[in-house]
Image: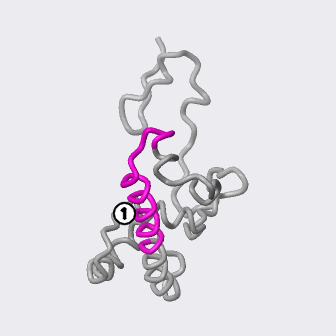
């Protein structure tokens, strides 16, 4: 905001918005710290992704957890996912294009359809593996 209105001091702008000067500078410092964290995390992720490009966020986090701790980066799994989303580095899941139908070309035994020839509704309920009650 201060860069947009160069003629007005930080104190006056902060008073207009009901904030303190410390809050203004604290926000700037935290944004630069966040940018540094993002850059460091993305560098670590790039090294791992060169070896395993299809690694998802959860497994990636467990792989780089030690590196994050060594570099004093306090980044959790959800924050890592947010960083990867911002950088466009999440894995795109390939979905099936057509419908998934029944696989009829299998090597398992085929059994006859016992319900197809039933003449009454009671015969459609099965009480065992292959036996059906007869209609009376």
Task: Please tell me whether residue 135 is drawn above or below residue 16 in the rendered image.
Answer: above
The residue located at (35%, 78%) in the rendering is 64
Closer-to-camera residue (70/15): 15
- Camera sees residue 42: yes
**Residue 82 % position (x, y):** 48, 60
Q: Secondary structure at mark 1?
A: helix
**Residue 31 % position (x, y):** 46, 63
The residue located at (27%, 83%) in the rendering is 70
Closer-to-camera residue (97/53): 53
The residue located at (69%, 50%) in the rendering is 99
Mark 1 closeness class: few <14, some 14–19, many ≥20 residues within 10 Å: some
Task: Please tell me whether residue 118 is drawn above or below residue 20 in the rendered image.
Answer: above
- Camera sees residue 104: no
Closer-to-camera residue (59/5): 5
**Residue 20 % position (x, y):** 38, 47
Closer-to-camera residue (121/44): 44
Residue 23: in magenta span: yes
Q: Is residue 99 left or right of residue 56?
A: right
Which secondary structure is most common in the magenta stretch? helix
Which stretch appears magenta? 15-37
The residue labelled by disc 1 is 77
Q: Is residue 98 left or right of residue 84?
A: right
**Residue 35 % position (x, y):** 48, 70
């Amino acid at each position: 905001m201060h860069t947009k209105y160069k003629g007005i001091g930080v104190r006056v702008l902060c008073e207009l918005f009901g904030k303190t000067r410390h809050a203004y500078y604290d926000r700037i410092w935290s944004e630069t710290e966040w940018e540094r964290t993002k850059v460091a995390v993305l560098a670590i992720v790039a090294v791992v992704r060169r070896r395993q490009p299809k690694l998802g966020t959860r497994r990636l986090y467990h792989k780089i957890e030690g590196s994050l701790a060594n570099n004093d980066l306090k980044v959790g799994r959800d924050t890592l996912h947010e960083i990867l989303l911002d950088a466009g580095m999440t894995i795109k899941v390939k979905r099936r294009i057509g419908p998934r139908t029944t696989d009829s070309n299998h090597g398992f035994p085929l059994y006859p359809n016992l319900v197809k020839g039933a003449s009454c509704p009671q015969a459609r309920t099965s009480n065992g593996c292959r036996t059906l009650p007869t209609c009376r």
